[in-house]
Image (cartoon, rainbow, N blue to C red):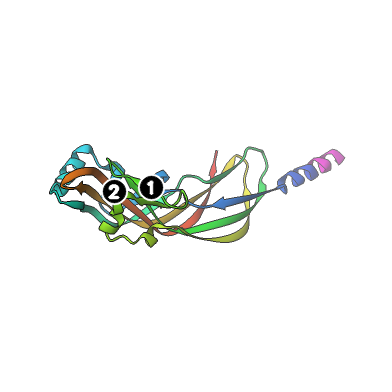
Amino acid sequence: MKKIWILNFIMLLLYCITYKSLCTISAKDYTEYQEIILSKGKMLANFTDEELQKYYKEVEKTKFFGWNTFIINKKYKANFISDTIYSFYNTGTTAVDYDLNCVYETTSKTSISCTGSISYSFKGTSENKRFKNDLDAALKMEYSNVTTDNYKQTEKMTIKIDPNTKLIIYISGSGTVLNGVGAYYIFWIRSELGGFEYFTVTDEYPRIEKISI
């Protein structure tokens, strides 16, 4: 009887074990998202060479100096899921309480990417990219919209994780996509040709899931 009482006491202690962790939650650059679903159209990375060649015909007309551009998808709505940014495995035989002290870095930003000979440079930080040769100005995209605005919020929570269960935290959200092609001319000679894309995050929030392993 005494052995059974001791065993039950030990099991109760194991059940009440609490793990503590501090995590910073913030979505990565959109080119690293796990999934992006557009309301219509497609992302620049999904265009075939044949499609790009067709759109390049829209910017073939030469000019003395500057950009010829053609918009393919104009601020279409998108929903996204980022990669997993935090996870915890309970491979034991008893449930555990997991205390999370999370710092959410909410961002409002526009990220960019490009193909072909169009290029960008970094301004200030690695998060702040801008197309070269004033492509932003030619598209009437204010540079203030291409910077990152962060604010932090701390939240504490306790999550019970059953045996053989994994806790996953990732970021979901929504945004808009604008992409197209452009050609840059100097004295009627084309020096750049390629695709460009802007992805603007309009809303993001953490998602927490528990799945069996």
Image coordinates of residue 44 in percent, x first then y, are 29, 45
Crowdedness of circle 2 by 10 Å Cα count: few (<14), some, many (20+)? many
| Residue found at the far right of this picture | 2
Please name the residue shown 32% across and 49% down the image: 132
> Where's the C terminus, which quadrant?
top right
Please name the residue shown 22% across and 49% down the image: 182
Q: Is residue 188 above or below residue 106?
A: above
Question: Which one is earlier in the sequence, the residue at label 1 or at label 2?
Answer: 1
Image quadrant where residue 94 sits: top right
| Residue found at the far left of this picture | 61
Image coordinates of residue 110 in percent, x first then y, are 38, 56
Q: Is residue 91 left or right of residue 57?
A: right
**Label 1 vs label 2: CA separation?**
14 Å
> Where's the N terminus, which quadrant?
top right
**Which residues lie in the magenta part?**
1-7
Asked if marks 1 and 2 touch (Cβ < 8 Å), the reply is no
Q: Secondary structure at mark 1?
A: strand
Q: Nearer the viewer, residue 32 or 55?
A: 55
- Residue identifier under label 2: 196
At label 2, which amino acid type do we have? Answer: Phe
Image coordinates of residue 168 in percent, x first then y, are 54, 46
Comparing marks 1 and 2, which lies closer to the viewer? 1
At label 1, which amino acid type do we have? Answer: Ser
Q: Nearer the viewer, residue 54 or 15?
A: 54
Q: Is residue 156 left or right of residue 175?
A: right
Q: Secondary structure at mark 2?
A: strand
Q: Which mark is residue 99?
A: none
- Residue identifier under label 1: 121
